[in-house]
Image: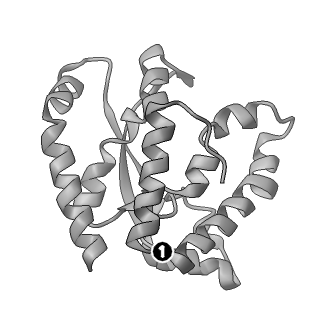
Amino acid sequence: MIKSTLDFIFALLGILLLLPLWIIIVLTPTVSIFKQTRIGKYGKPFTIHKIRTMTNGKVTKKGQFMRKTKIDELPQLFNILIGDMSFVGPRPDVPGYYDLLRGESRQILNCKPGLTSLAALKYLNEEALLLTKGNPQGYNDTVIFPDKVKMNLDYCKKKSLRHDLYIIGLTLKAIFVKNKITA
């Protein structure tokens, strides 16, 4: 209850404080917001909002900056505001991953998905890592995804306001100090 209330308050504050940025986003012809289906709490699909950073399958220069600074994730403040997401929790995945989990791993779906997590921080440069692999999809499915599941299960078991504040601090450090964070 406290977490949901804080999520709502800080998402609303973030949206209001970033109003000039929202206006720039809306008025910039080369920037647009896109929607994508993700898996949420209890395995329920929901629509996530992000700023488009690619054209013709390639990340644009503006897109590189937005991804590096996580500006492309800001529209998810609206997802937090309406209650689909939280600031901290397992990053919501596309259908075909979390919704297919079995056994204890499925407990991840009892947690509201978040804007950030320790797993997201550990794999902050996931795209670059996957580019170094001969079979990126296979590496994701056999190494990265199982590790994320383990880390997210651990988070769901010990989540607390203090732990969330710690993760938010690490996230801000990763974005603004540009340090590589490993869990």
Q: Residues within 10 Å of mark 1 (few under 14, many from 20)?
A: some
Q: Hey, what amino acid is under mark 1?
A: Lys
Q: Secondary structure at mark 1?
A: loop
Please say if 111 is above or below 181. Answer: below
Q: Which residue is mark 1?
A: 159
Residue 181, horizontal then vertical, whole percent: 61, 43
Q: Is residue 82 visible?
A: no
Foreground: 117 or 160? 160
Foreground: 63 or 65? 65
Considering the image in quadrants, where does the C terminus appear? bottom right
- Residue in the image at 57% along x and 48% along y: 121
Residue 31, horizontal then vertical, whole percent: 31, 24
Q: Where, by quadrant of the figure, is residue 97 drawn?
A: bottom right
Please say if 181 is above or below 24. Answer: below
- Residue in the image at 56% along x and 74% along y: 108
Please say if 28 is above or below 3. Answer: above
* Residue found at the very far bottom of the displayed protein: 103
- Residue in the image at 65% along x and 35% along y: 127
Q: Say whether residue 111 is left or right of residue 154.
A: left
Considering the image in quadrants, where does the N terminus appear? bottom left
Q: Where, by quadrant of the figure, is residue 19 drawn?
A: top left
Q: Is residue 136 visible?
A: yes
Please say if 73 is above or below 100. Answer: above
Residue 7, horizontal then vertical, whole percent: 27, 63
Foreground: 103 or 119? 119
Residue 144, horizontal then vertical, whole percent: 73, 53
